Amino acid sequence: MTSHPAAASQAAPTERRWHPPVGTIQVVDPSPLNWLFITWNTMEEPIRVDQEGHVVPALATDAHWLDERTLELALRTGVRFQDGEPFTAHNIKQNFDEMQRWTAPHPPGTWLNFPPESVCEVVNEHTVRFHLPGPDGLALGKMRGFHIASSAFWREQGFGYAKFGSGEGHW
């Protein structure tokens, strides 16, 4: 028995499935600022600043002070990293804890660093609280320099952990 060509072209469409990206990005930019362009184009921050200098939410949907030392962020739902991992409050905590390990996590200046006594608490899947040792009027601005990467980033690369054992100075 042979099939008619018109019947074959009317076959049911195949189901589309999501597949993670494949490949490696090779960076050949000798600029000492290439780390900055990479993070700006591959990572997101909880808070951004618009062209007029106003604080605007990015991965966060809201930021408010519970008291003078506790900043709470409500986080976006339905966000995924490039590798398909869902974004949750646990990613914020992991990134915060990793950055707090470094003496100088921000090459542009220590003003972006949170004091070492600072702690990030996961309240629920989409809420985090930052407990600071004292009032910090720059805390929201510091969130602009707080790049959030997936768990796979920290497990596999982490700003040089795999190669050097530390991310310190290897942005």
Image: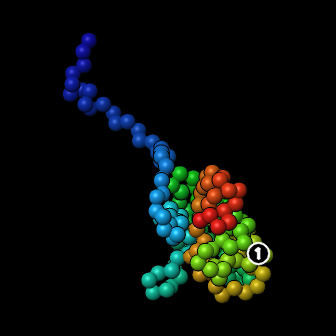
Tell me where residue 154 sits by quadrant: bottom right
Tell me where residue 158 sits by quadrant: bottom right
Residue at the location (73% across, 67% down)?
A: 101
Q: Is residue 55 above or below residue 150?
A: below
Residue at the location (74% across, 83% down)?
A: 69
Residue at the location (63% across, 51% down)?
A: 156
Give the x, y percent position of residue 78: 53, 59
Q: Quadrant of the C terminus?
A: bottom right
Give the x, y percent position of residue 41: 47, 65
Q: Which residue ends up furthest to the top in the rendered image? A: 1
Q: Is residue 1 above or below residue 132?
A: above
Give the x, y percent position of residue 136: 69, 85
Q: Nearer the viewer, residue 156 or 144?
A: 156
Left or right of residue 99, residue 32 in this image: left
Left or right of residue 61, residue 169 in this image: right
Residue at the location (26% across, 12% down)?
A: 1
Give the x, y percent position of residue 64: 64, 80
Tell me where residue 16 sits by quadrant: top left
The amino acid on which the numbered mark 1 sits, given as a three-letter code, is Pro
Q: Nearer the viewer, residue 106 or 125?
A: 106
Q: Nearer the viewer, residue 17 or 24?
A: 24
Q: Which residue is mark 1?
A: 116
Query: Mark 1 falls on what kind of element?
Result: loop
